[in-house]
Amino acid sequence: MRRGYPNLELLEYKAKEYAFAIHQNILHDALYPRIKADVFIQTWVNTATGFDDDGVVSGQAFTDEYTTVMEMSWSKRDVARHIIDVPDKIYIVFFGNRLAYMYLNPNEQFFEDLKNRNMKSQKESKEYL
């Protein structure tokens, strides 16, 4: 079973809102993030896809779901001009159209999994710290 394509405009909006809520200093009007989206299909062992927390009711069927990894970054010139503390990059992961997790400085395992198109579930994502 495969679900529909992700709505990238919606995911970009959610990514900005989530990042801005966590990091109030990047809410400055003059700072517009550059966003790159990497979209690929992952196969999960049940219908909960990457949201496998305890208590989630799901069917036992292999399920294909689009994974979207968004990389947000800012122009160093814009950041310097406004003299504010902004993270270099933020990575935000979605399964389908749902936010899964966000990391400022993920470890090498994150980038290896991204390269292999096999991101960890929400529950396992702590391994990226």
Image (spheres, rainbow, N blue to C red):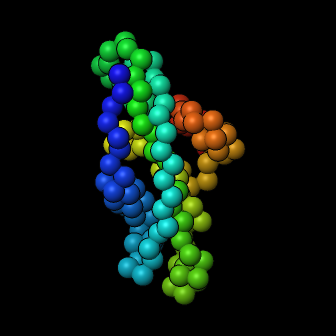
Q: Is residue 53 above or below residue 35?
A: above
Rendered location of residue 22, percent (x, y): 42, 59
Q: Residue at x 54, y 87 (%)?
A: 81
Residue 101 appearing in the image:
no
Q: Residue furthest bottom?
A: 81
Q: Residue furthest right?
A: 108
Residue 6 appearing in the image:
yes
Rendered location of residue 103, percent (x, y): 53, 50
Rendered location of residue 66, percent (x, y): 42, 37
Q: Residue at x 42, y 43 (%)?
A: 94
Rendered location of residue 92, percent (x, y): 47, 50
Question: Which corner quadrant holds the C terminus?
Answer: top right
Q: Which residue is at the front of the view, 9 or 59?
A: 9
Question: Which corner quadrant holds the N terminus?
Answer: top left
Q: Residue at x 42, y 59 (%)?
A: 19
Q: Which residue is at the front of the view, 122 or 59?
A: 59
Q: Is residue 122 above or below residue 1?
A: below
